[in-house]
Image: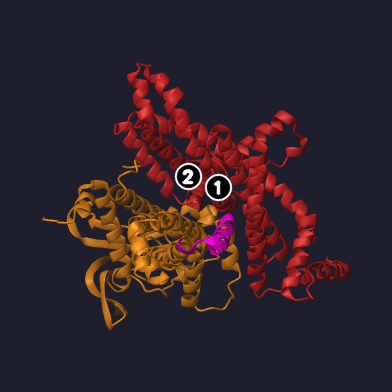
Amino acid sequence: MSIWVFIFKRIFQSLPIIIVVSIISFFLIRLSPVDPLAELKLNPSISKETLEHEKQRLGLDKPVHIQYFYWAKNFIKGDMGTSVTGEKVSSKIKERVLNTLLLSFSVLFWTWIIGIPIGVIAALNYRSVYDRLLTIFSSIGMAIPSFFFAILLLIFAQKTGWFPIGGLTSANFYNMNLIEKTIDIIHHLFLPTLVLTTISLAGLSRQMRANLLDVLDSDYVKFARAKGLPNYKVIVKHALRNAINPLVTMLGFEFAGLLSGAALTEYVFQYPGLGRLILEAVLKSDINLVMASLMIGSFMLILGNILADILLKLTDPRVRVG
Amino acid sequence: MNIKNPELRRFLKDKISVFALFVLIVLYVAIFFADFFAVYDKNYSKRSLSYSPPSNVYFIDELGDFTKPYTYNWKRVFNKDTLSIEYKQDRSQKYYLKFFSKGFEYKFLGLFKCKRHFVNVEDGGELYLLGLDINGRDNFSRILYGGRISLTIGFLALFISFPIGLLYGGISGYIGGVLDNIMMRMAEAVMSIPSFYLLIILAAILPSGMTSSQRFALITIILAFIGWAGFARVVRGMVLSIKTQDYVKSAVAIGCSKSRIILKHILPQTSSYVIIAMALSVPSFILAESGLSFLGLGIQQPDASWGNMLKEAQEFANIIYRPWLLTPGFLIFVAVLSYNLIGDTIRDILDPKSKIKT
């Protein structure tokens, strides 16, 4: 099966899931006793015409299931309505999605760069002091509530002044040249990345360790050793490659975890990401914004899983679409 | 000690998890007898001393001799030079601590009235073991009462979400076909919504004006709603392989009903996985509740939960000048860590193939 057929099949499979997600999120929010236009009506800067347009767009004078189709049709066209503040929801979300992706990728990058070597070293030194230390540290990493850790780091940033507090860019961002801009963003990304990396590092390094231990126990590794291959070759050429494959599958889950987990961290660091957007939208009962960010979040999650599957297909040709 | 059960014996051999179990037992005893250990009742509030630091307890008096433990009251003074409010100890009067003496009245185990408390202070004295919060409420006592919510909500959610997941996965896997397809797409859809987003939305559509116990119940149900889907999928996978075994076929042959086969013959086979999954998912429920309450969407004031007590940590002045307000965060950490350690050990014992071990 060529890779393109695989990709096509995988995307086709997730269509029904996306439809079910949209139905769930639509009816969930319609269940709430909030009038979807209440906040808009309260805002004096929003004109009668906009209100009327919203009413037409949402089909509020029609029964609920028709409203769903109205909403879905507009959503596909990219019209997600107006937020409470009067801005277009779609433009607001676009900016936030990019920020969240930036944070997620930076976290995934560091988790893999740090987590895999740690797991490998632990597996190669099975039951040694180092191995035990890893277990203890990863247990601690998994147990810290992310928002609590974020608060502790904020204290640190406040006391030392080494890191900016909150946001993604400094106040004078627009006056900087490209290099300064990059440095500024990295500077702001550091603490949120640190929090989320610490938390997902624990799971990844443990998984890597377990996979490698499994592989080292297998017959072909024993055979390679018996054949007289040097140890490093056995590990790098035979064991590692096979031990990493299951992690690629985990990538999708990890991304899902990041989207959820990042919300609290984004909130504490005032990071302009999707998680904080949805949180603020919920608190302001900004229905359009909530619906759209919920859908986009789920969309990203499904897309992340598809990407992980394609990656797995590339690294492991045995994989088939189930 | 002569323990017959080999699994239990292996568990007790593991020093780290026995210690973790001990920590959890201490926490649960403390919250179960919260009324007894609390120094002040839930509604106690001394606004004139809000944010006062923890009382220092002394065992050695000025002369260097050991005495009964005593404490001094805090006094609020306005510093004219720095233009700030400071707390000073009022050294004029010592107040001795009293143990097992009478304090505020409560219902012991909800059954009979009682006034005895573990620790108390002489009349006129004030004993704030972990300081006061913004409303002048005693943090130590509130942590005990808040723990009741934070440490039990995970368990309750577990006992709602796991039976649902088991049944859902069992039916989907055993009956198969179109039903299986539909049920699994539903579960996958629920899993595809980022769980924390779903959590805050569900919490936000709760109508306001509920009593605190109604809110507690609904938050529990919401937490349960998040967890069941992933679990149901794994159960379904296990059921698919179990249902091909001979004993299930023979049960079908002698004419057992489908519900009987699923409930009596298939689901019990998944028990070791279920126990492992349950042990490992309590912490995530505890973290979810604390996160939700931290954002102000979970348990609401004036009720305490560790998450909503940490809300005060959102202010910089608090975390820098009043670090004792962060105690609930450390307690969440300790509880979650203990659960994780115990869960890991249980997995090692029940699932010998797994190599992720301590």
CA distance for labels 2 and 1: 31 Å
Image mark 2: chain = A
- Local packing at callout 1 (Cα closer than 10 Å; few below 14, some 14-19, many 20+) is few
* Relative depth, front residue between B85 and A249: A249
List the residue tagged with mark 1: A322
Disc 2, SS: helix
Q: Is residue A49 left or right of residue B170?
A: right
Q: Amino acid at mark 1?
A: Gly
Where is residue A148? Give x, y as percent: 48, 51
In the image, residue B139 sits, relative to residue B277, either above or below, namely: below
Outermost residue on the right side: it is A49
Which of the 4 image quadrants contains residue B304? bottom left
Q: Is residue A164 visible?
A: no
**Chain coloured orange in this rendering:** B
The magenta segment is: B174-194
Image mark 1: chain = A
Q: Residue at x 36, y 30 (%)?
A: A216
* Relative depth, front residue between B161 and B46: B161
Outermost residue on the bottom side: it is B112
Q: Which mark is residue A199?
A: 2
Q: Residue at x 34, y 66 (%)?
A: B251
Residue B276 colored magenta? no
State the predominant SS element of the stretch in magenta: helix
Q: Colour of chain A?
A: red
In the rendered image, the quadrant that contains the N terminus of chain B is bottom left
Where is residue A111? Give x, y as percent: 51, 37
